[in-house]
């Protein structure tokens, strides 16, 4: 996910209740009784869309002020999200999100006089099937006060996102109408933009509740408690009859994870044991996002295919995933490869696909999916993980059959489609080895978007991102040798060991570092105490050796090397000197060809703001060393790609550091359960393993990293959060980015690539993360 996948966000306080055209439609539908004949008609019939998905029912999972429930059976799969207000004017928010068709509803409940709390009654969720192919879910809500219905949207989760994150953007195409209303129920009804799909959201008054229509003008529909001292209960039912595509079949834990046997390496066996017996709740969350033909990026906001998310998840979880689940992820990516070898970033389906097709002048396409190919970094993510899989025993045995499969979405075999992507990678990287200059780096494709930090400010207004032009630039071409060896051998401009890493190197002297840090903490309103010792990490775990004040270096003259976040463009070749976490790509994708990257890793894994580590997680960027003062705000803890923590970036860093230390025989992680790639870049062990000081510094950095990760345990499987400094404690608290930032984005409670931690082991304790964190002295 990225800024391209969202509109610029504002607080999700909706405007006044049901206004304008929306109100007119509601009033008309209330006036004309003929509309009441369009009933919901829910007789409970066998569903024609049974898909034999394993049942799921869990919640609430609380994150950033939102409570999340999940339900899935053979009929329907959905996530329910409730957010209560905290004042007599702040509304409660109710969302349902279905993976099938990326279908959703949004309703605001505006409190009358008093703060309103709304929750879902325990165990009340179930699926429903109705006439005319209607399927969906029903459940019971409990409300602590009277309320009026505010803005209500039926259609696509994307339309809901546009409103919630876009400061109230309400496309007229997604406005609802009221089908019927009486003293005991109100039904919102909307026809989709294409075909015969009709969607309903119905509320039935149950205990201590009545539906009312105000006598004021304009009229407002609301709920009144019959006895003010008791909660009202309402049953909601939301259904739709989207039949133009088959609902995907959900996977079970047994199908998702590889089976352990006597030949399984000990570390991997311990991780699989922990997943099975210790991580039931977390596993259920991942299972909700896992389907036979694709994995979903995250809920509630991204219950669709995202190429980058699935490929990075697979890269990190490969040792623990079954071959069937692995090939399901790979097939989803391969079958969406574009005509020029591009990897699809995002798939838009259902009603929002109709919306985009109409806007693109092709209304006749209806709900035909729309594929987004804007992200150039995603083009480089398939080949490395495909090579990893084909090096495993299962991958070797299944490679020929897998590549021979025929795509069901676009013409061609899997091999033909992968070959198309490989040729694209070779073409994009062909010129650089012969002319080592910015001119031959790869720019993002559709400025300002193009890599995972795809926004103007997210890359510091740069066009050439580090992650693409340093690690991925080399990893993808070299992987062709394991995936399509004939293409690798026949290519007249075979990939070399050349990449653009050195063009991003920035040297920082001790004097410049201290001056920059002093200015930064003043601009960022942080205390100078964070610059000494372990900073906010004091007493968070076992303090590792090597802490020093005011700074730590690795020998030499005290200068440090960092890697710039990006290069501005071909005309302005200056670097954006923002310290960032993307050095993790060089570690995890095994493109480290020099100790320089490892020393830069040690520098990055210092306490924030000297480095990236806080007591509640690793931030993904810090402008502490950038002399451009405006970047302090652009990369603050209120910015989506600033001094905030993304869990998957922590996992990528942890897995990558473990992979590098394994070359020196110093890793106990599941990465060691995979066979090593061909030694294109380094001998094993590499020469730097003989540098005792460097190796010790890496181990100390690893301990610091895991001290930081452990502090984010409560949000480890979510999307993004903001470290907020608490002066009274001298440490950071976990903050809700969407709530505290005027242009922030609400995070997901479930985020696919964050579950990569299920495959990792805490090196401080040798304990699988799936078994939860404990003090370093404890054991599994």
Image (cartoon, rainbow, N blue to C red):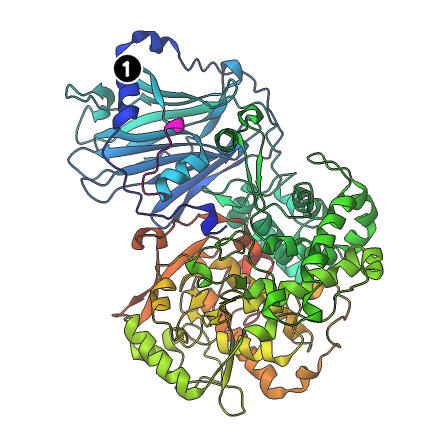
Please name the predominant secondary structure of the magenta segment in the image. loop
Q: Image quadrant of residue 713?
A: bottom left
Q: Image quadrant of residue 616?
A: bottom left
Spot the residue most to the bottom.
557
Q: Residue at x 37, y 44 (%)?
A: 165
In percent of width and height, residue 273 lies at 63, 55
Going by the image, does 100 lie left or right of 614? right
Specify the quadrant that holds the C terminus. Answer: bottom right
Q: Image quadrant of residue 213?
A: top left
In percent of width and height, residue 507 lies at 50, 82
Secondary element under disc 1, as helix, strand or loop, is helix
Q: Eyeballing the image, is 354 above or below 310?
A: above
Going by the image, does 612 lie left or right of 357? left
Camera-nearest residue between 439 and 162? 439
Q: Residues within 10 Å of mark 1 (few under 14, many from 20)?
A: few
- The reply to whether residue 565 is visible in this rendering is yes
Q: Which residues are magenta?
A: 166-174
- Residue 170, magenta (yes or no): yes
Query: What residue did someone put label 1 on?
Result: 28
Q: Residue at x 23, y 37 (%)?
A: 116
Going by the image, does 545 lie left or right of 26? right
- The reply to whether residue 81 is visible in this rendering is no
Q: Eyeballing the image, is 277 above or below 299?
A: below
In percent of width and height, residue 251 lies at 62, 39
């Amino acid at each position: 996910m990225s800024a391209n996948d969202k509109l610029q966000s504002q607080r999700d306080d909706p405007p006044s209740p049901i206004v304008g055209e929306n109100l007119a439609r509601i009033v008309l539908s209330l006036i004309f009784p003929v509309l009441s004949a369009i009933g919901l008609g829910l007789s409970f019939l066998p569903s024609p869309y049974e898909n034999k998905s394993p049942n799921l029912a869990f919640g609430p999972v609380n994150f950033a002020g939102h409570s999340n429930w999940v339900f899935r059976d053979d009929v329907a799969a959905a996530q329910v999200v409730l957010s209560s207000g905290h004042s007599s004017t702040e509304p409660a928010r109710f969302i349902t999100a279905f993976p099938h068709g990326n279908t959703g509803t949004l309703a605001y409940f505006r409190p009358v006089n008093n703060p309103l709390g709304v929750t879902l009654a325990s165990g009340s969720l179930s699926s429903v099937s109705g006439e005319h192919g209607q399927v969906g879910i029903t459940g019971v809500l409990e409300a602590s006060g009277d309320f009026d219905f505010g803005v209500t949207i039926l259609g696509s989760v994307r339309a809901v996102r546009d409103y919630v994150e876009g400061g109230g953007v309400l496309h007229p195409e997604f406005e609802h109408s009221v089908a019927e209303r009486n003293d005991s129920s109100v039904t919102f009804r909307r026809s989709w933009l294409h075909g015969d799909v009709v969607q309903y959201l119905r509320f039935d008054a149950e205990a201590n509740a009545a539906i009312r229509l105000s006598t004021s003008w304009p009229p407002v529909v609301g709920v009144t408690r019959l006895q003010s001292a008791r909660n009202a209960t309402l049953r909601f039912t939301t259904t739709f009859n989207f039949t133009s595509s088959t609902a995907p079949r959900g996977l079970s834990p047994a199908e998702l994870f590889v089976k352990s046997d006597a030949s399984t390496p000990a570390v991997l066996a311990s991780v699989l044991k922990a997943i099975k017996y210790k991580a039931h709740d977390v596993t259920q969350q991942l299972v909700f996002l896992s389907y036979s033909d694709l994995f979903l990026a995250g809920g509630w906001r991204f219950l669709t295919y995202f190429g980058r998310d699935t490929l990075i998840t697979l890269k990190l979880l490969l040792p623990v995933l079954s071959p069937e689940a692995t090939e399901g992820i790979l097939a989803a990516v391969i079958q969406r490869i574009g005509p020029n070898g591009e990897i699809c970033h995002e798939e838009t389906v259902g009603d929002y696909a109709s919306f985009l097709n109409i806007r693109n002048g092709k209304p006749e396409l209806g709900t035909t999916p729309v594929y987004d190919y804007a992200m150039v970094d995603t083009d480089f993510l398939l080949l490395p993980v495909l090579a990893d899989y084909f090096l495993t025993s299962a991958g070797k045995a299944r490679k020929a059959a897998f590549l021979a499969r025929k795509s069901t979405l676009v013409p061609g075999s899997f091999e033909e489609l992968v070959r198309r992507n490989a040729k694209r990678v070779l073409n994009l990287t062909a010129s650089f080895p012969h002319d080592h200059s910015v001119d031959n780096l790869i720019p993002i494709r559709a400025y300002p978007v193009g890599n995972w930090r795809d926004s103007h400010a997210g890359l510091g207004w740069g066009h050439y991102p580090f992650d693409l032009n340093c690690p991925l630039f080399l990893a993808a071409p070299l992987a062709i040798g394991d995936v399509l060896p004939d293409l690798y051998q026949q290519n007249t401009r075979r990939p070399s060991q050349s990449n653009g890493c050195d063009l991003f190197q920035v040297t920082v002297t001790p004097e410049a570092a201290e001056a920059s840090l002093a200015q930064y903490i003043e601009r960022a309103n942080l205390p100078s105490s964070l610059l000494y010792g372990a900073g906010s990490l004091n007493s968070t775990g076992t303090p590792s050796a090597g802490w020093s004040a005011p700074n730590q270096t690795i020998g030499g003259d005290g200068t440090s090397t960092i890697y710039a976040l990006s290069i501005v463009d071909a005309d302005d070749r200056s670097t954006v000197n923002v310290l960032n976490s993307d050095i993790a790509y060089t570690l995890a994708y095994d493109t480290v060809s020099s100790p320089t990257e490892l020393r830069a890793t040690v520098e990055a894994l210092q306490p924030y703001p000297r480095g990236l580590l806080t007591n509640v997680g690793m931030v993904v960027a810090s402008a502490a060393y950038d002399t451009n003062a405006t970047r302090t705000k652009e990369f603050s803890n209120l910015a989506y790609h600033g001094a905030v923590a993304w869990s998957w970036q922590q996992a990528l860093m942890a897995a990558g550091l473990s992979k590098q230390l394994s070359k020196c025989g110093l890793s106990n992680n599941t990465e060691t359960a995979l066979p090593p790639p061909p030694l294109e870049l380094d001998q094993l062990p590499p020469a730097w393993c003989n540098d005792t000081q460097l190796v010790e510094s890496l181990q100390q950095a690893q301990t610091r990293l895991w001290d930081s990760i452990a502090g984010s345990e409560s949000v480890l499987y979510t999307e993004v959060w903001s470290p907020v400094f608490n002066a009274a404690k001298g440490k950071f608290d976990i903050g809700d980015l969407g709530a505290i930032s005027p242009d922030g984005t609400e995070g997901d409670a479930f985020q696919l690539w964050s579950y990569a931690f299920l495959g990792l082991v805490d090196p401080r304790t040798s304990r699988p993360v799936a078994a939860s964190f404990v003090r370093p002295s404890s054991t599994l």
